[in-house]
Image: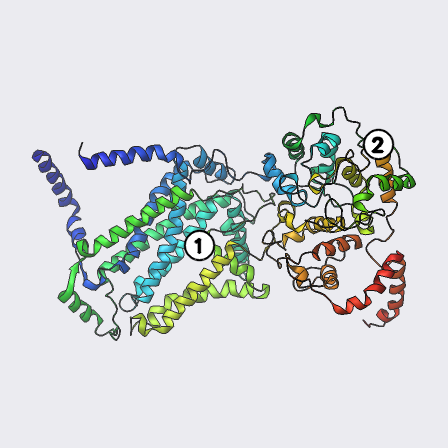
Amino acid sequence: MSGLKQKGIAIYRWLDSRLGLAGPVIEAAEHPIPKSSASWWYVFGSAATVILMMQIVTGVLLALVYTPTARDAWNSLNFLNHGLTLGWFLRALHGWGSDFMVAIVLIHMTQVFMFGAYKFPRELTWILGVFLLLMTFGMAFTGQVLRFDQDAYWGIGIGASIMARVPFVGSKLVHLLLGGPIIGATTVSRFFALHVFVIPGILLAFVGLHVWMVLRLGINEWPMPGRLVRRSTYIQEYEAEIHKDGVPFVPDAGWTDAMFAAAIILAIMACAALFGPIGPTGPPDPTIIQTVPKPDVPFLWIYALLALLPPKLETPILLIVPVVVICVMLALPFFAGEGEKHWSRRPIAVLMVLVIAVSLGTLTVVSLNPPWSPEMTAWSADPVQPRFLRGRTPLERQGAIVFQEKQCRNCHALAGLGGKRGPDLASVATRLTEDELVRQVLQGGGNMPAYGSALSPAQTTALVAFLGTLNGNERPARDPSLELTHSNAAQKQQKF
Amino acid sequence: MKTPAKILAAVLLSASVGCNHLPGKPGLRPETQRPDQTHDFATLYKTNCSACHGDNGKNGPALPLNNPVYLAWAGHDAIQGIVSNGVPHRLMPAFGPGAGGLLTAEQVEDIVNGMMKNWGKKDVLNGQNVPAYNPGSAGDPTQGQAVFQRNCASCHGADGKGVAGGPPHVTGSIVDPSYLALISSRGLRDIIVAGIPEQKMPDWRGDASGKPMTDREVTDVVAWLVSQRTPHPGTMVTPADKRKNQAAIAPVQSRGGR
């Protein structure tokens, strides 16, 4: 045993005398950090790096099987899912790893912002971080495209049509992105090159610089209210603190990073095992119209935003807001590079984080069950619940069929079942009288199209008869003036 | 082996066995196929038919399909024709490829076969004197009215306008002009012969007089009902009225008024 140990040490010495890496690595690991920074709040950056490593390993393994062509990509994903031992788990790890990566990077950025860590002298670290965030989103988007299914196909369509709105060079940008004017054979190859070579290459270089600067400039100290950052004095103050109260990164702080990273990897594995791989949904064939494409979780908020924006604002918002936001983020350390770091003294910063988080969260939650698009299969797939048919006359039952056949159900749910575009009609008769129902159906209004030309008078009569029964246990809406004239109308009706 | 090594071995062993049973593991085939590759009857029925014909072929507003008498009486070919081509000018849409539907011919076949297999009973009409599926003649409305009085009036009322008092009495008219405009003669014949079991509407055998209806009687009742259709159901405004109104407002419109 001791012979083996001797040999091992000899090999290590032989290598190190040539490489000379052991000294700097150990020095980096033991570099002193403020004692206050050995905290569970400082673990997100390293966790993101560990997820990146996992993504690289799983990505390389996926690339062994994945075929980056428009014709075979979908089949190779299904081969991974169904034909290869644990191929599904590999896809699941990479997919969930991507979602966790975006989440952790966003949390990391929020923490850095709230702790004022972007201030002097760490401006460039922040700027690189902004680019790393953009590249993380770039990886998530290109990865979603490589999962070449219906969501991916229509997702690129949206991406391309956003790019096409750029003035003057729009169509050239679309050509560059798609490898032609339309999504074709070269599109998947382009995204493969971006996802596997271009973005990861830059990403790794930037991560290297980012970590290098963290080591060189030191980890941000725990912010204290009233302790101001000044360019003239900060470095001396930081070094004095390290000298007085510093601890080595390993082992004093490193263990929290290691524990958290391990917990995150375990969480990714658990999600992969429990929820399985993400997609692929149906084959990427534009002739299949029975599809409701949706982007992956990191882009759901954009999906909701685009759906809810007034059409006139789309182009300005799509083209101007991202540029402004990115510029503001890049410029942040220059106009707020000094002063307070503690969140209790930075109310605008706290408010900004809250507003952004609540906005993105709300848009994401709304997009999970989007009320803006009709449910195109509801008319043939969502049964009229039997309780709405009990004791109904033959005419009212025909009205229920009209309700389905004319696809009212695609926008109007009955007791929660059906489209969410228009109001649920389970109790419509408590809100509208018979005449109002007829008018609404025939003339539309309030965001509803007019159906006058799509319905015969008999169909309208039956439909309104059915809708008139939908009053739950409440009293139906009534128009007292109608009761006075009703006898005349009934007499006239009998003439025909 | 030391204890930690034993635990590790146990974990690895159970993990290697458990991997085949993880909840995230996909099934044997792609979960999402091309829509035209779906051949499972339950899925096809659910997504295409259940909205009107009800979950499991019952309790929907349209004709119940989970009715062995109807399935045996109409037969595979007639049902296939209706699913493929719909009922022209009525509410049953066409699902077949030739008539603008989104299903393939094979899928229509899968639906019809699935209904026959799951809900049909082959010999349910054996030895029964069942009326023909297609009427042999136009029928006589006067005769039909008499048959209606005998066989149907106890639940539908003498004039077909319904009877109060709950099942088996039918509230609501079956001679309402709008109702008669929406339902085809074919549909009326289907209901009279095959019945609507869940609504206590008997088939052609379960009439009040205790004697099954004959083919002729069914045809006559349908003829009587159909004879009560009106030219302009569901509206108080006839096309002549419309023309008159338009003529009246035309001079105003030509002056740019509203």
User: A418 or B167, which lies in front?
Assistant: B167
Q: Which of the two discs, 1 and 2, sits closer to the camera?
A: 2
Quarter of the C terminus of chain A within the rendering = bottom right
In the image, residue A100 above or below residue A450: above
Whether residue A190 can be seen here: no
Whether residue B7 can be seen here: yes
Q: Report whether A439 appears left or right of A4.
A: right
Quadrant in the picture for residue A217: bottom left
Q: Mark 2 belongs to which amino acid?
A: Thr
Q: Name the residue under label 2.
A: B214
On what subunit does the disc labeled 1 rest?
Answer: A
Quadrant in the picture for residue A441: bottom right
Q: Report whether A179 appears left or right of A92.
A: right
Q: Report whether A359 appears left or right of A128.
A: right
In the image, residue A146 above or below residue A319: above
x and y percentages locating residue A154 in the rendered image = 54, 49
Quarter of the N terminus of chain A within the rendering = top left
Q: Mark 1 points at which residue?
A: A298
Q: Mark 1 belongs to which amino acid?
A: Pro
Density class for disc 1 (Cα within 10 Å; few <14, some 14-19, many ≥20) is some
Density class for disc 2 (Cα within 10 Å; few <14, some 14-19, many ≥20) is some
x and y percentages locating residue B113 in the rendered image = 66, 30
The colour scheme applied to this rendered structure is rainbow
